[in-house]
Image (cartoon, rainbow, N blue to C red):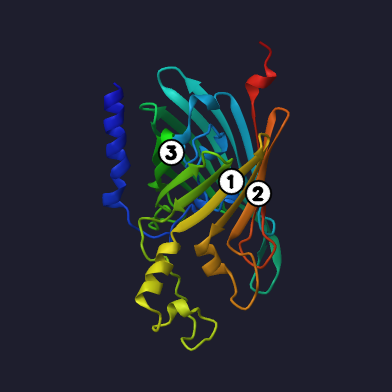
Amino acid sequence: MQNNITRFFFVFLFLPLFGFSQSESGTTYAFLNLPFSARSIAMGGTFLSVYDNDISLALSNPSLISSEMHNQLELNFVDYFSDINYGSVSYGRTIEKLGAFVASMQFMNYGDFDYATETGERLGNFTASDYALNIGWGRALNANFFIGANLKGLYSAYESYNSFGLAVDVAATYLFPASKISSSIIFKNIGTQIKTYTPNTQEPLPFEIQAGFSKELAHLPLRFSVLLTNLQRWDLTYVDSSANQSDTFIDNETSNQASTIDAFADKLMRHIILGAEIKPMKALSIRIGYNYLKRKEMSIPTKLSTVGFSWGFGLHIYKFQFNYAHNSQHLAPSPNYLSIATNLDQFIGK
């Protein structure tokens, strides 16, 4: 039985390589690519490969789901820009002989909008929102090798337009205990729209291949991570087709005089996110991250800023784990991320 599950999983894992190669532009349900875990965004990315029974990481990397997440409950909330906010709630449950499961509900609320004519006459208001119901499953194939998958039901409603979709994530994680290294590969958002916003306007989902590894030092409470994103597409450089080629604001990266080595290094770094986490004491973690792509796209060369950098901390108080992160996305004030988790078993008398 286990061999059949393993064989099916690997067929499903590598099948997307032959059928999915679209870029993120022109996709729908883009909220799926937002970071929901305060811990992962503090280290620069939307996922991690750290296998330490943290339920907040299961939504983005289902191969991290383990039986230790049984009865864990976790809440994420992000007060995003303007009146936009989003978050998720996750609950873990282990079923004997089937594996470990994490059920999650994601939401994104875009706030209220005014109906208005071209002359400015207001006729009322409407709302817009996205939702995703996830059922995540994880299983250990042996002491070091873990697989997992998310099944996602998607719903989006913008005024009178709505859409339904179905997607899956598949992932695998391998541990190297002797060197304290964990590595993961993830295929995200494999799926389709079942009902489109308007007839005959099928839109692709934001498919992405991700990989990463983390390394914990042997004699220092420090873990660093390297994340690789958008592996299905090499060139992530954004070219503004409306910009004047003589505009001095354009980076040197778009100049024809840039060397081949510099251009290759720039394209490579756009896939790489660096992060670090240190635990000066058992109940406290301090984190920092750097996203090269975000800094190249969102910073202004003439302005000194921390765009592309993120930081945060984790604090264990009583029976709760609190995680906070701040992510500098551009010169405007950036959002704050908050996660709270607990194990309900701690509140149940034995």
Q: Earlier in the sequence, mark 2 or mark 1?
A: 1
State the SS at label 2.
strand
Question: Would residue 193 appear left or right of 225 to someone viewing this image?
Answer: left
Q: Position of residue 132 (x, y in %)?
A: 52, 42
Q: Residue at x 45, y 70 (%)?
A: 238
Tag 2: residue type? Gly
State the SS at label 3.
helix
Numbered label attached to residue 312: 2
* Residue 37 in sight: no
* Residue 336 in sight: yes
Q: CA distance from mark 3 to mark 1?
A: 17 Å
Q: Farthest residue in the front direction? A: 219
Q: Position of residue 211 (x, y in %)?
A: 41, 48
Q: Residues within 10 Å of mark 1 (few under 14, many from 20)?
A: many
Q: CA distance from mark 3 to mark 2?
A: 26 Å
Q: Position of residue 261 (x, y in %)?
A: 37, 73
Q: Residues within 10 Å of mark 2 (few under 14, many from 20)?
A: many
Q: Farthest residue in the right direction? A: 318
Quadrant location of the N terminus in the rendered image:
top left
Tag 1: residue type? Glu
Q: Earlier in the sequence, mark 3 or mark 2?
A: 3
To which residue does mark 1 refer? 277
Q: Is residue 195 above or below residue 1?
A: below
To which residue does mark 3 refer? 179
State the SS at label 1.
strand
Tag 3: residue type? Ser
Numbered label attached to residue 115: none
Q: Residue at x 32, y 53 (%)?
A: 20
Q: CA distance from mark 2 to mark 1?
A: 9 Å
Question: Count of labels shown?
Answer: 3
